[in-house]
Image (cartoon, rainbow, N blue to C red):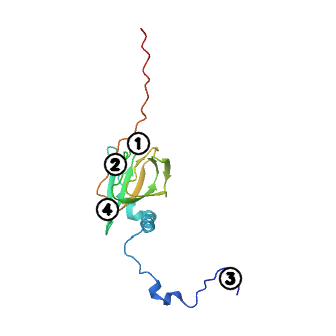
Amino acid sequence: MNSDSDLQIAGDILEVPHLLQAPREHPATVAEFAGLARSIAADRAQWEHLVRYDATTRWYHRLRTGPGYEVWLLSWVPGQGSGLHDHGRSSGVLTVLDGTLTERSERGTRVLAAGAQRVFAPGYTHEVVNDALEPAVSLHVYYPGLTEMPMHTPRACEARIEPSPVTA
């Protein structure tokens, strides 16, 4: 037998239990949190009936908690935004469920359509806005659970004013 790999498995790998990891009840890695968000997004019956739209303030609902994490459902009517903020010591996964959201950060602007995911580390500063004409819904997973959301002042471009020459 000719093989491109030097590794060949003899026998049934499932017969070597010490090589298999036990399935986890709750996510523990970034990939698992992103997977959790994707599985919730795919199960519309789990969240769609909970969504509310509020023209005066952003609506949000804590959908689920687990050991050290929480999952939030948010709705955004056109024009609503988060303001420039970070998530303190929490990492997160943002998943757009319906509509389109715009994320602005120091790295630029991204338009996030339904299905898009953004993963961020503690201290990541961004603003999320619904710049579209239709409402949007997003799912946010935070690990550890969100305990703070410090707001930031956008850095305005300061105009340089040159002094005018004084004539005598």
Of badges 2 and 3, nearer the viewer stands 3
Of badges 3 and 4, nearer the viewer stands 3
Ranked by sequence position, the earlier of labels 3 and 4 is: 3
Disc 1, SS: loop
Q: CA distance from mark 1 to mark 3?
A: 58 Å
Q: Give the percent coordinates (x, y) of residue 51.
A: 36, 56
> Which residue matches tag 3?
3
Closest to the observer, 114 or 33: 33
> Which residue matches tag 4?
145
Q: Quadrant of the N terminus?
A: bottom right
Residue type pointed to by label 3: Ser
Closest to the observer, 137 or 102: 102
Ranked by sequence position, the earlier of labels 4 and 2 is: 2
Q: CA distance from mark 3 to mark 4?
A: 48 Å
> Which residue matches tag 1?
79
Q: Badges 4 and 2: C-beta atoms under 8 Å apart?
A: no
Of badges 4 and 2, nearer the viewer stands 4
Q: Badges 1 and 3: C-beta atoms under 8 Å apart?
A: no
Q: Badges 4 and 1: C-beta atoms under 8 Å apart?
A: no
Q: Badges 2 and 3: C-beta atoms under 8 Å apart?
A: no
For residue 50, the mark is: none
Q: CA distance from mark 1 to mark 2?
A: 10 Å
Q: CA distance from mark 2 to mark 3?
A: 58 Å
With respect to residue 30, does 129 lie above or below? above
**Quarter of the figure with residue 94:** bottom left
Of badges 1 and 3, nearer the viewer stands 3
For residue 58, the mark is: 2
Residue type pointed to by label 2: Arg
Q: CA distance from mark 4 to mark 1?
A: 27 Å
Q: CA distance from mark 4 to mark 2?
A: 19 Å
10 Å crowding of disc 1: few (<14), some (14-19), many (20+): few
